[in-house]
Amino acid sequence: MLDHFGSDPVFSPEQVLENRGRVAIFIDGSNLFYAALQLGIEIDYSKLLYRLTGGSRLLRSFFYTGVDRANEKQQGFLLWMRRNGYRVIAKDLVQLPDGSKKANLDVEIAVDMMALVGSYDTAVLVSGDGDLAYAVDAVSYRGARVEVVSLRSMTSDSLINVADRYIDLEQIQTDIQKFHRDQNHPPQIPPIERKKDNGNGSSLELPSHE
């Protein structure tokens, strides 16, 4: 049944947009990167912001990511993000005993979603991480709608179950991907994590991009 979630909506797309009110966007940068990797696309972040806002009034768009301060390309990408509509929340990567690097920003996402309740009517969460299900449920109980956007194969059922609306990233990929003819937007710079849980218990290895 979950595979058909949202295929027969109670409200038309026009009615959904009319009822969204003020929108706040919360993007798990690492989760989005791995979803794009699975789809074989490069994200155009200007198009992404336009698609997620959907003509509604935008309160703020947050982008959460782990960073390597010595990575100049990544720093340049994050500077572009800050100057083009995103509030970047960055956290230094921590090296784990197995040699991988990781920065978990679930707490930051959850705290910001809760702290801003009352300032937005609809939260758009771009993540498939089931650890955020409790925060989504809490936000819903405080009167806000929550839309979850992520790749279905990387999305926890517990997160979908507490969302008011779920959008499979694969269904909107043509609206948000970067094409080679797009010259005005920077390339997608991946996070530096070498391994990342993809939401269903398995891990992905980030290939070298030197």
Image (cartoon, grey):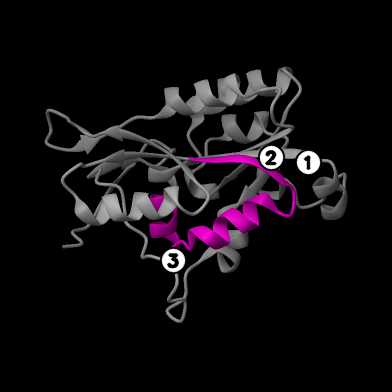
**Front in this rendered view, residue 80 or 199:** 80
Lower position in the chain sequence, tag 3 or tag 1: 1
Image quarter of the N terminus: top right
Q: Determine whether the residue tagged by mark 1 lies in a helix, strand or loop.
A: loop
Q: Which residue is mark 3?
A: 41
User: What amino acid is labelled 2 in the image?
Assistant: Val
User: Which is closer to the viewer, label 2 or label 3?
Assistant: 2
Residue 36 at x, y percent in the picture: 43, 58
Q: Which residue is depicted at the point 87% across and 44% down?
A: 10
Residue 81 is left or right of residue 101, and the answer is: right
Residue 6 shows in the view: yes
- Secondary structure at numbered mark 2: strand
Q: Is residue 87 above or below residue 4?
A: above
Tag on residue 193?
Answer: none
Q: Which residues are magenta?
A: 33-62
Q: Position of residue 147 (x, y in %)?
A: 67, 39
